[in-house]
Image (spheres, rainbow, N blue to C red):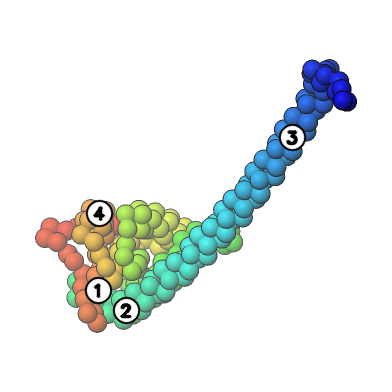
């Protein structure tokens, strides 16, 4: 009968080989994990860039739509606004300017733009037209009217300057804010416009 040698226990070589195999597997697992993380990160970055592109495109489209609404409101309001202000005693012959631009003293940089300017020998009314005005529109128009005043003073033009805020949709809160600033409020009603002049209202002169 053949005799078998007893199996040897764990030797240094065997333990070392086990450690090496374990280390190899850990490195492979770590490399695979890193690869998956890089892949996930790249995919996340791609999705973020794609979302950002869509947001930018959407903002661009909304901006174009807002401009079209603004132009539509301007063309609806402009034809009737002269006679409405004349009914208040202003005596304008016609609209003196649509999209009237004011430049700085050097004439190189645009510093303000008015949707509608009404002028006669005594008065100027700067009109801002928006589809649905906001508080920012009120504040921006006050700043715009101050610039117009400075511009006319440089030209020794001492005519009174008034402001008006016009909108196809005019929230009550915005109407109140504009009137508080001393502006006329022009609103769209059907195919014409009306000017809200509350009792006791005194228009501000810039």
Q: How far, Cα to Cα, is label 2 from label 1?
A: 8 Å
Q: Residue 53 occupies which quadrant of the picture?
A: bottom right
Q: How far, Cα to Cα, is label 3 from label 4?
A: 72 Å
Q: How far, Cα to Cα, is label 1 from label 3?
A: 76 Å
Task: Give whichever of 72, 90 is nearer the camera.
Answer: 72
Q: Earlier in the sequence, mark 3 or mark 2?
A: 3
Residue 27 on image: x %, y %: 75, 34
Seen in the picture, residue 178 relative to 8 is either above or below; the reply is below
Residue 152: mark in rendering? none
Query: What residue is shown at x 34% (from left), y 74% (from top)?
Result: 73
Seen in the picture, residue 169 relative to 206 is either above or below; the reply is below
Indicate the quadrant containing the N terminus: top left, top right, bottom left or bottom right: top right
| Mark 2 in CB contact with mark 1 (< 8 angstroms) | yes
Q: Earlier in the sequence, mark 2 or mark 4?
A: 2
Q: Residue furthest right?
A: 2
**Circle 2 sits on which residue?**
76
Q: Residue furthest left?
A: 199
Query: What residue is shown at x 55% (from left), y 56% (from top)?
Result: 52
Residue 199 on image: x %, y %: 11, 60
**Circle 4 sits on which residue?**
177
Q: How far, Cα to Cα, is label 2 from label 4?
A: 23 Å
Circle 4: is it few (<14), some (14-19), or many (20+) Cα within 10 Å? some
Q: Residue 132 occupies which quadrant of the picture?
A: bottom left
**Circle 3 sits on which residue?**
25
Q: How far, Cα to Cα, is label 3 from label 2?
A: 76 Å
Circle 3: is it few (<14), some (14-19), or many (20+) Cα within 10 Å? few
Indicate the quadrant containing the C terminus: top left, top right, bottom left or bottom right: bottom left
**Circle 1 sits on which residue?**
188
């Amino acid at each position: 009968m053949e005799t078998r040698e007893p199996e040897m226990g764990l030797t240094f070589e065997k333990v070392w080989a086990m450690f090496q195999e374990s280390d190899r597997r850990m490195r492979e697992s770590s490399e695979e994990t890193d690869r998956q993380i890089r892949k996930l990160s790249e995919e996340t970055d791609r999705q973020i860039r794609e979302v950002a592109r869509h947001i930018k495109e959407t903002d661009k489209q909304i901006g174009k739509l807002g401009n079209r609404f603004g132009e539509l409101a301007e063309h609806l309001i402009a034809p009737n606004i002269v006679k409405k202000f004349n009914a208040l005693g202003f005596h304008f012959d016609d609209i003196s300017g649509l999209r009237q631009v004011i430049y700085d003293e050097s004439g190189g940089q645009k510093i303000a733009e008015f949707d509608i300017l009404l002028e006669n020998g005594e008065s100027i009314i700067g009109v801002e037209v928006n589809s649905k005005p906001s508080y920012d529109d009120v504040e921006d128009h006050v700043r715009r009217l101050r610039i117009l005043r400075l511009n006319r003073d440089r030209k020794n033009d001492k005519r009174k300057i008034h402001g008006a805020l016009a909108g196809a949709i005019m929230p009550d809160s915005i109407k109140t804010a504009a009137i508080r600033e001393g502006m006329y409020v022009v609103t769209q009603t059907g195919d014409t416009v009306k000017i809200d002049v509350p009792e006791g209202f005194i228009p501000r002169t810039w």
